[in-house]
Image: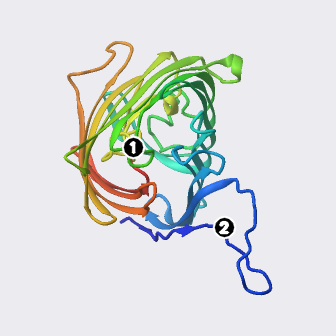
Amino acid sequence: MKFLFLLVFSISTQAAVPADSTGSAVRVTKKRFFRDRVIIPLPVVFRFPETRFGAGAVVSSTFSFAKDSAWAKPSQFSFGATYTQNKQVLIFMPFNIFAANNKYYLNGDTGLFKFNFLYFGIGENRVAEERFDVTFPRVRLLAAKLVAKNTYAGLRFQYETYNVTATALGGELGSGRVAGSSFSRTVSLGVSVLKDSRDAVFFPRHGVFGELYILPTLRAFGADQNFVRLFADLAHYQSFGSKNFVLATNYTTSFMVGSNIPFSQLSFLGGPRKMRGIYEGFFRDKNAALFQAEARLGVWKSLGVVGFGAMGFMGDDKTLIRLNLPKFTYGAGLRVTVQKKNHLNLRLDYGLSPYGKGNFYATLGEAF
């Protein structure tokens, strides 16, 4: 048994105009740092077999900088925390920030996690579901600068100390044969190039958003292994006829170079963004390639519906990508606009696959 409940409401923050003692309005010059700021709280209650009851909250804010022009892209900052009956903790702080009239782009995914996850094997060597407990801080940062029209260049940084505290009795992780099955430390620094010609940040109707990066993880940086990730991610958006219908497509590849790469750092498929319908990391190997598409249709005022599908492939040193062994998922979802100015949606998706039960996802913003 499992269920997830979210209560959504938004609070718009606006500057007030004070009045003088006679009751007439007084113009006050006051410097503002933000403009069009909206705060969206999301209380969360859930129950899973591995957590029992849990509760927490996510607070997300969209905003623009007051000094930027009206056409500058909006930014988003979120903070969330949950706690369960099994004393598990999830604290996370993702953000996407455009500053100085889109001249600078900052992206981050930072958090502290004390939780348990599921392991299903590596490559085509599937194993029965193994639950494992892990504690780790995670820092993923991108800092980029506009260097040409719609093009950014910058640096990516990653830090993660992955401490596995418990594994399934008699399982593959517990055997010690899997790299990183007890502990791994990842410290990475690399270069990134981005292309962003989207007409909007939160609900694009045309344009592309893509990133290509090379991310070395080195003992010289403080990591416990040497390896390199080569990653490319491109999303394309096109509206047809009415702007209420949008076709979004996404192409992703991830290639790993090196040996003894920790299992937590391998390329993977699954989760709320990359191949909805299977557990995040259900498939993992050195290399992965993914294509997914989503049809988005506005149906009435703040409500919309989507249908989506994905096809993915895995690979290793022997076979770069195993094209003869594709993986599939599909599903549908509901969209509720919670911030009209920038068309920020609450996303409610249900994904299915041939590999097990379906998965439900509830979060802010589109999958890609």
Q: Which residue is mark 2?
A: 15
**Of tags 2 and 1, which is closer to the observer?**
2
Please give the count of numbered marks on the rendered protein.
2
Quarter-of-image position of residue 106:
top right
Residue that extends furthest to the bottom in the rendered view of this protein:
22
Q: Establish if 116 lies above or below 251.
A: below
Residue at 51%, 68% in the rendered image: 10
Tell me the element at label 2: loop
Residue at 65%, 51% in the rendered image: 66
Quadrant of the drawing holding the C terminus: top left
What is the x, y in percent for residue 122?
39, 29
What is the x, y in percent for residue 222?
71, 23
Q: Dot 1: within a 10 Å radius of its alpha carbon, few (fewer than 14), some, or many (20 or more) residues?
A: some
Q: Nearer the viewer, residue 244 or 41?
A: 244
Quadrant of the drawing holding the N terminus: bottom left
Distance Cα–Cα, label 2 vs label 1: 36 Å
Q: In the displayed structure, does residue 182 sit left or right of residue 240? A: right
Tell me the element at label 1: loop
Instruction: Say which amino acid is labelled 2.
Output: Ala
Q: Nearer the viewer, residue 243 or 114?
A: 243
2 and 1 marks in contact (CB < 8 Å): no
Q: In the displayed structure, does residue 131 sit left or right of residue 253? A: right
Q: What numbered label is drawn on residue 45? A: none
Residue at 31%, 66% in the rendered image: 301
Q: Establish if 300 lies above or below 347.
A: below
Q: Establish if 193 lies above or below 37.
A: above
Q: Dot 2: within a 10 Å radius of its alpha carbon, few (fewer than 14), some, or many (20 or more) residues?
A: few
What is the x, y in percent for residue 232?
42, 25
What is the x, y in percent for residue 338?
44, 63
Q: Which residue is mark 1?
A: 273
Q: Nearer the viewer, residue 271 or 247?
A: 247
